[in-house]
Structures are given as C-alpha cells and as structure tokens.
Image (cartoon, grey):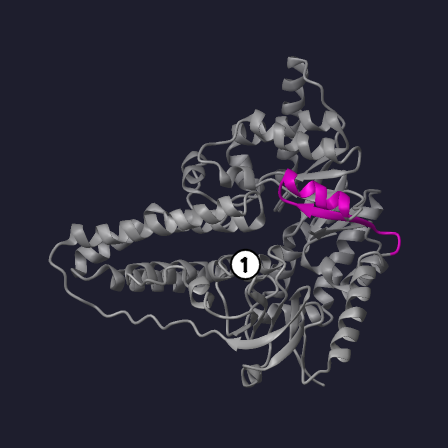
C-alpha cells in the first residue's frame, strides 16, 4: 500500500474511483454595443437569476452556516455599488456586459487583495465566486448548475481538483460524490465549511501527483489527510476501523475541560444533546438577521433564543450578540443599520452604532434567560470602553424588562469574546469587568499570524508550534484565572488534538467544538 499525505479538513472515509475536475475556462472578449440600456438589462437578469439561486440555497440549508454563506453572497451580488460600477463601465466604454463584469470584478478583487486586514483579503475569493457565476450565466451556457451538471453523468467517485467554489460544493450530488481532494484549499475556507456541513470527506493541500492516480480506486481519510493507493480489502478495513475508534475517543480525551458545542440555530440543539454536550459554548445569532428580509422583532428573537435555552434544560448556553458586518450583511441590513462597509465596522461596533436594534436583541436574550442557564457574550471587543458600553446597554434592557414585569435573570453572566490583538493586550483589565472569557481562535489566529482564512499556509502555520499564538492564549488564560473567571476556547483549533492538549495544560476550562 502506498500513501500520499494531505491535510484532512472534513472527517470521514471514502473509497472510490478518482477523477479530475477541471473548471471550464471562461474567455471574455470585448464587443462594441449600440444600446446601453438593453445591454445592462442582461446584467440585471443574470444578477436576479443568480440571486434566486442563492436564495434557493439558503432555503435548502435553512438555519445553517451554509445558509449564512449564501446570504452573504446574495448581499454582495445585489450590492448597489457593484451594479452602479457595471452600469458606469458599460455606459462609458459602450461595451458588452461580460467585459464590464470581468473588468469591474477584477478591480474589486484587486482592491480586496490589497487590504492589510486578512479578513478583508479573504473577500477576494468570494468576489471571484460571484464573478464566475455571472460570466457563466451571461454566457447563456446550458450548464448553469456548473459542477452538479458536469458530474450528473458520472458514476460514484472521488473528486480531485485544484480548488472548488462554495456553489460547486453546495451543488454536489452526495449520492454520487463520495469525497473531495484538493491540491489547494484552506481549513478555514467556505468550501471546507460547506464540505463539513454536508458530511463530505475532504483533504486539501495534496500533492499534484494525485492527478496521476485518476481512474484508479483510492481510499481517503478526511481526518488524517491520508490517501491510500494499491491497498487490499483487509488493509482498507483495518485502517477505517482504527481511524473510527480513534475518532470516537478523540473529543472525550480532554481532561477536566468541559466539552461544549457551537451552534447557529435552535435546530442544532438536538445534535448537541445527542453528542452529550455539557453545554453550548457559542450560539451564533447572525442567521436570524441574514435570513430575514426585514429586521427581526424582539419577539422573533425571543422565540428562537427561548427554544435553545429551554431545550438545554439548565445546561449553559452562551449567546453571542450579532456579529454582522463586512461580508455578513444583507441589503436591508446595510440600509437599516447605516452600514457603509467601513473597515472594522463589525460585531460589537456595529451593534453600538445601532443601539435600538442592539437593545431589542439584549431584551430577547434576557427574557430567554428566565427559562434556563443563559449568558451573553460580545464579539470583536477591542477596548474597555466598548465593553462598558455593552454592559450599560444590558442594564438598560434589564430596567425596561423589570418595568414591564417580564421574567428574567437580572444576574445573567456577561462575557467578552477575545479574538483581537487589542483584547489580548488589555485582557487583565477586561477580566476585572467580565464574568467570563471566550477565546475566538479563528479571528485571533488570522490577526496574530498574518495568514488568511482561505490560505493553505494558515493550516501549515497551525500545524507547527506557534509561540506567538500560544503566548497570547496563555496571557488570556492567566488574566482570566487571576480575576477568578472561567475561560473557554472556540474555533477550528478545538478540532486539533495537539491544540486541545495545549489548552488543557494552559488551564482552559472548556472548549466549544463546531457540530
């Protein structure tokens, strides 16, 4: 048996014939046009058609991270600024809309890639996805389903490719596609997240020599990143058996740390209970805002939060307030929240700029706290002043609910999410005012290591010892324990045995793992 090593990013095993997927090259030529309005209408129709496809994906994957992603894509696609740029280009150059899309999006991609901020740099990949969708739709290709259409005539197998887009992953026929192997990719990319959500085994960072194995039967392990060739039936059975045994024991080997899970909606609670989770360490609340065409009311939010808290029957539920901004924004939210895409206007900053919306959410959370063991946490904290402002808003919510005679837990714990270098540096000061800390390793890793989420180098960085990141986490843990408050960790690092061992030795009290 021969083995090729990649990076496992979506657990599971697959055995099947390997075949290569090469995306069709889109050739765009400039043509002169006579009627600007008619030409621009082609763009509008293509945009609306794709928007409807994104909406269909949101409905198909209702209340999941996948739905959030397509909501973000839809928001970027329908952004008025992009449409204005396309209109201006077609009007000034008197050219076909395909050429305008290619040039305008090419410039946007370059603009995002030029940002120093890694989070903003990652948006270039999203713009590339939208650009390709528009060009394919404008080409009037019969294969609008892209990946799904190309694979519909194939037998079951494992896909090998340089890269895949989010839409391509979402449209895969899981009854035929058993696994994915990419020579590129990133542990933190939207593609990886979608593969996990769809339970598709996936390996990234494979050597290009994998293409030489096309048309051969292979065995892939999406956990270890191993690709087995020329194996016997006995060898395959033994590897899968040992890997599954290891996987089943993996998350329980955490010492005294508590095992929480991270969720995005009330629909996820049953999985937490099935996995015997000791609580919910991160309840992301953005989905209710992204899925709606109007601002959710306090009652809408309360119904959702109450469903989560009550189902957990007294187990801890840490509710993070909305982390909106940047790509997590829809047209109606941008308008109602007066969000102009300013760098850094994300998370708690956006909430504090829209205090009535923020207050509605806090009131809903405090009302839900009467039904169980809830606490509230604020994302992207960068200063003491921000945290104090958030606590001030909490006091206002309490006073209003008490005046109305609403039941609530007025002593509900209030925590800070530590995911920015600024928060790390003031951790001791924050710990004196917070009831608990939660370390958001995804954003913290990006900012400290200067690696993009979509970059495979990020995973290579995290596979090695990272003294700077480790020291930052140690600083946070020490600050929390000196102040006598608990500290938990959430994010991709919780899936790594090596990092879990580090968390345990550092004195982390709990980890929160994505379902």
Question: How many tags in the picture?
Answer: 1
Q: Residue at x 81, y 70 (%)?
A: 242
Q: Locate residue 164, reporting x and y percent.
A: 50, 66
At label 1, counting other C-alpha atoms closer than 10 Å, the crowd grade (few under 14, some 14-19, many 20 or more) is many
User: Could you tell me which residue is drawn at 47 percent across and 47 percent down?
Assistant: 71
Locate residue 102: give its quadrant.
bottom left
Q: Is residue 263 above or below residue 462?
A: above
- On-image quarter of the N terminus: bottom right
Is 85 on the left-hand or right-hand side of 339? left
- Can residue 75 be seen at all in this image of the molecule? yes
Q: Which residue is mark 1?
A: 190
SS at badge 1? helix
Pick the residue in front: 163 or 434: 163
Query: Magenta residues, as a range?
Result: 255-274
Q: Do we see residue 342 in this rendering? A: no
Q: Position of residue 263 (x, y in %)?
A: 66, 45
Identified at 21% across, 68% down, the residue is: 30
Tell me where residue 470 appears, x and y as whole percent: 75, 63
Residue for point 40% across, 58% down:
130
């Amino acid at each position: 048996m021969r083995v090729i090593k990649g990076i496992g990013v979506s657990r599971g095993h697959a055995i099947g014939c390997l075949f290569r997927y090469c995306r069709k090259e889109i050739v765009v030529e400039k043509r002169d046009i006579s009627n600007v309005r008619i030409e621009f209408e082609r763009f509008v129709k293509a945009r609306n058609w794709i928007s409807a496809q994104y909406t269909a994906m949101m409905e198909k994957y209702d209340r999941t991270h996948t739905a959030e992603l397509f909501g973000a894509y839809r928001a970027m696609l329908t952004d008025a600024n992009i449409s204005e740029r396309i209109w201006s280009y077609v009007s000034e150059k008197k050219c076909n809309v395909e050429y305008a899309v290619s040039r305008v999006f090419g410039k946007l991609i370059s603009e995002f890639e030029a940002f120093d901020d890694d989070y903003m740099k990652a948006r270039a990949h999203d713009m590339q996805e939208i650009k390709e969708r528009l060009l394919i739709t404008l080409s009037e290709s019969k294969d609008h389903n892209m990946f799904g259409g190309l694979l519909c005539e194939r037998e079951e197998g494992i896909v090998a490719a340089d890269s895949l887009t989010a839409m391509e992953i979402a449209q895969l026929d899981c009854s035929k596609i058993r696994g994915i192997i990419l020579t590129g990719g990133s542990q933190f990319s939207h593609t990886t997240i979608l593969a996990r959500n769809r339970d598709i085994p996936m390996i990234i960072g494979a050597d290009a020599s994998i293409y030489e194995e096309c048309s051969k039967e292979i065995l892939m392990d999406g956990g270890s990143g191993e690709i087995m060739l020329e194996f016997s039936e006995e060898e395959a059975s033994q590897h899968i058996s040992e890997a599954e045994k290891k996987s089943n024991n993996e998350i329980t080997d955490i010492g005294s740390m508590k095992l929480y899970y991270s969720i995005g909606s009330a629909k996820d609670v049953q999985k937490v209970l099935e996995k015997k989770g000791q609580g919910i360490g991160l309840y992301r609340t953005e989905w209710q805002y992204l899925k709606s065409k109007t601002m959710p009311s306090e009652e809408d939010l309360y119904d959702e939060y109450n469903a989560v808290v009550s189902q957990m029957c007294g187990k801890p539920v840490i509710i993070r307030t909305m982390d909106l901004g940047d790509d997590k924004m829809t047209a109606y939210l941008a308008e109602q929240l007066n969000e102009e895409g300013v760098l850094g206007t994300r998370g708690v900053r956006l909430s504090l700029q829209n205090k009535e919306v923020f207050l509605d959410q806090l009131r809903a959370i405090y009302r839900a706290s009467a039904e169980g063991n809830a606490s509230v946490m604020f994302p992207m904290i960068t200063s003491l002043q921000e945290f104090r402002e958030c606590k001030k808003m909490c006091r206002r919510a309490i006073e209003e609910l008490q005046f109305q005679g609403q039941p609530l837990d007025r002593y509900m714990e209030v925590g800070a999410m530590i995911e920015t270098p600024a928060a790390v540096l003031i951790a001791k000061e924050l710990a004196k005012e917070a009831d608990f800390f939660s370390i958001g390793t995804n954003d913290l890793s990006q900012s400290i290591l200067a690696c993009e989420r979509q970059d495979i180098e990020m995973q290579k960085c995290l596979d090695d010892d990272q003294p700077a990141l480790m020291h930052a986490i140690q600083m946070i843990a020490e600050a929390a324990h000196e102040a006598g408050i608990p500290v938990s960790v959430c994010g991709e690092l919780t899936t790594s045995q090596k990092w879990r061992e580090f968390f345990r030795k550092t004195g982390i009290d709990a980890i929160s793992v994505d379902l």
